[in-house]
Amino acid sequence: MRENAKDPERHARRMAKKQAVMQQRIKSADQDQGVLLVLTGPGKGKSSSGFGMVARSLGHGCKVGVVQFIKGKFSTGEDRFFRNLPDVDYHVMGEGYTWDTQDRERDVSAAEAAWAQARRMLQDDSYHLVLLDELNIALKYEYLDLDRVLDDLAARPAMQHAVVTGRNAPKELIELADTVTEMQVVKHAFKAGIRAQKGVEL
Amino acid sequence: MRENAKDPERHARRMAKKQAVMQQRIKSADQDQGVLLVLTGPGKGKSSSGFGMVARSLGHGCKVGVVQFIKGKFSTGEDRFFRNLPDVDYHVMGEGYTWDTQDRERDVSAAEAAWAQARRMLQDDSYHLVLLDELNIALKYEYLDLDRVLDDLAARPAMQHAVVTGRNAPKELIELADTVTEMQVVKHAFKAGIRAQKGVEL
């Protein structure tokens, strides 16, 4: 298409065709429903995308819940920004990365307590969206029982959105989800010796 | 690893090893630098991830710039949430999707005006992060000259982060970038008849 991209008539014809396709697509997707989103894969952007949806929900005047699993030793930008907003219910698991604690029992207790918060939100339809950040890490290490997590997600209010982030999403969660994105690394600054930057990763 | 995930001693040993690897990695990535991020591919999460980084930057007390290309006919959650915050300089190209205008000249003018805003931000080191949302769409349709865009991105202040979103990122932009994520669709609610939801896509 590059060759003729600048021909105005061809452009108008092509766009009219595209408009018809888009209108048909939009017409056939006419249901409103709470969606379960899973953002997984090794690429950068999973948690930040979850927090973008938190911001969008707040923009529509809705209440949101956030539970951060695993992360929590340091104060991040998202934590500072969202934690004290009136429509945000924000919980951090608070034991840091699992390779830093090196204590399985402590990690399991912390994950259980975090899930109790998540479960409370998933049973309350006043939450428009619930972000379960890095939940996949807690599932991978089996800090939480997968079946219980899936049951609680499936039983949430019909109009509530839930967003689960983290690498290595279990296949049963992917099956349950409505929208799943796998984030692939094309390149990453970290490998070129650039550490995590405030506002980008932190 | 699932089999022995629950053995506490094995867990402690594995995590100690992982901690050493992570510490070494963190040690060898010791540079601070403004990074150019590109979020591309067909999967859900590109713009929302960009807005998550906007929130993170604001959490650190930094000033951010946002220019939205292509989108702009309707008021989105991110628009309502971020537009009026004191540390956010927010511009929307304002002509809607290109298949709705069907007028190439109008699209080009709108893109040029939007790029003038972007360029101003990219020349001003008081902006910690500049989000160029859906810029890749404007580049794909050649509303903007790619070389000029690349030159302006490359010439930005050394500590400034820039985030470019949208499908079909041109390969020259990927070459210039520090971090690139390709978002793949595993599944999408839209295909199951669920329309775009407030707080998720809007």
Image (cartoon, coloured by chain):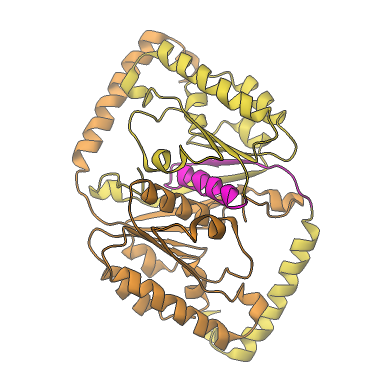
Chain colours: A orange, B yellow
The reply to whether residue B179 is visible in this rendering is yes
Q: Which of B196 and B113 is in front in this view?
A: B113
Q: Which of B105 and B187 is in front in this view?
A: B105
Q: Where does the N terminus of chain A fall, quadrant-wise?
A: top left
Q: Tell me: residue B21, above or below residue B186.
A: below
Among the 4 quarters of the image, the one containing residue A71 = bottom right
Q: Tell me: residue B120, above or below residue B19.
A: above
* Left or right, residue B43 beside residue A155: right
* Left or right, residue B156 beside residue B49: right
Estimate the x, y position of residue A117 in percent, counting from the top left. 40, 74
Q: Which of B5 and B98 is in front in this view?
A: B98
Q: Find out whether residue B51 is within the magenta segment.
A: yes
Estimate the x, y position of residue B80 in percent, counting from the top left. 39, 40
Q: Which residue is pictured at 47% across the width and 74% down the height?
A: A139
Q: Find out whether residue B179 is within the magenta segment.
A: no
* Left or right, residue A127 beside residue A97: left
Q: Which residue is pictured at 50% across the width and 74% down the height?
A: A138
Estimate the x, y position of residue A108 in percent, counting from the top left. 51, 84
Estimate the x, y position of residue B35 in percent, counting from the top left. 68, 42
Q: How many marks?
A: 0
Q: Which residue is pictured at 45% across the width and 80% down the height?
A: A113
Q: Where does the C terminus of chain A fall, quadrant-wise?
A: bottom right
Among the 4 quarters of the image, the one containing residue B22 = bottom right
Which region shows up in magenta?
Answer: B31-60
The reply to whether residue A5 is visible in this rendering is no
Q: Tell me: residue B150, above or below residue B7.
A: above
